Amino acid sequence: MPRPRFLPLPLTAAVAALSVALCSCSSAPGSTAGAPARAAAAAGDDAPRMTQQEMNARPRDALRQGGTLVWAIDQYSSQWNPVQADGSEASTNDVVKALLPTFWRSDAGGVQTPNPAYLSDVSSELRQGKQVVVWTLNPKAHWSDGTPITWRDLRADWQALSGQDPAYRTATTNGFDQVESVVRGRDDFQAVMTFKEPYSEWQAMFNNAGNAPLLPERYVSTPELFNTSFKNRIPVTAGPFKLGSLDTGAAPSPWSPTRSGGVTSRCWTRSSSRRTTPARCRGPSPGARSTSTTTAPTPRATS
């Protein structure tokens, strides 16, 4: 299967901008299409930027508990590791983006900001001529099995995606192949990443927008684990949703605790006949137990 190309985030934005520019240049003679942009460019102003998203955004506390969320995917994946060679496809990424951690959030203009659910702080600086990124993790963040997210997860991801060991069947090594080392910082919740040379696209790392979420050390620390742990299953999560079950002939149903306290609940479903099928999901309640693939178990708040 041919491997897809991965573009760094700013480069992707540049390609999109180039496409818009080319479309404007192809306007018919005498057309006013693109005139405002040309006028702005002639005046030396920056090109217009997207600042709005077509969504009905609401505060978290204004959302009701429970409900049904249906995603349409083109196939049912057999490899749910999105950075493994066989898992790098749209159907995998569409699902795991809601299940695995992303260290970054993107606004309508593509500006990246740290996700406080996982990062308390992040910085990039030059030390003795080398770029050093310090990732300070939110100590409340943990995997769905209760294991804390620590610097060891970042080190394991780097070792798997560095390209140094071909036994790791990776879909991409972008950025990780530029890293020289990942070591423990002041405690288990800080990772110090040193690059071989300055790397401007470091914000694409551990980023769902770049199809590179964080994966747990327990399931990627060896080539065998990396290649097989997510085959036909999703063993652990730490995103907005937690997996309830996988059933190729029925409806998977995750529930969603927040990463650092509070509770929300959703369901997503997909039938084996390439049609999305809604499932009924109820919000969590004290003492609730999972009685079927569409019942949400009691979430455990992390605060």
Image (spheres, helix red, strand yellow):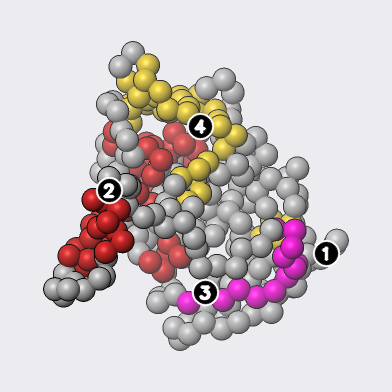
Q: Nearer the viewer, residue 293 or 115?
A: 115
Q: Quadrant of residue 164?
A: top left
**Mark-to-mark CA distance, 4 and 1:** 36 Å
Could you classify mark 2 by the number of other residues whose Cα lies within 10 Å: few (under 14), some (14-19), or many (20 or more)? few
Question: Mainly helix, strand or loop, the magenta region?
Answer: loop
Q: Which residue is mark 1?
A: 285
The residue at which mark 4 appears reads as 122
Looking at the rendered structure, the secondary structure element under dot 4 is: strand
Give the distance between the C-alpha atoms of the residues marked 2 and 4, in whole angstroms. 37 Å
Q: Are marks 2 and 1 in contact (CB under 8 Å)?
A: no
Residue found at the very far top of the displayed protein = 128
Q: Horizontal and vertical percent for residue 300?
A: 75, 52
Residue located at (33% from left, 47% from top): 46
Q: Which residue is mark 2?
A: 43
Q: Identify the mark nearer the N-term, 2 or 4.
A: 2
Label 3, label 2: how far apart the Cα atoms are: 45 Å
Residue type at mark 1: give it.
Answer: Ser
Q: Nearer the viewer, mark 3 or mark 1?
A: 3
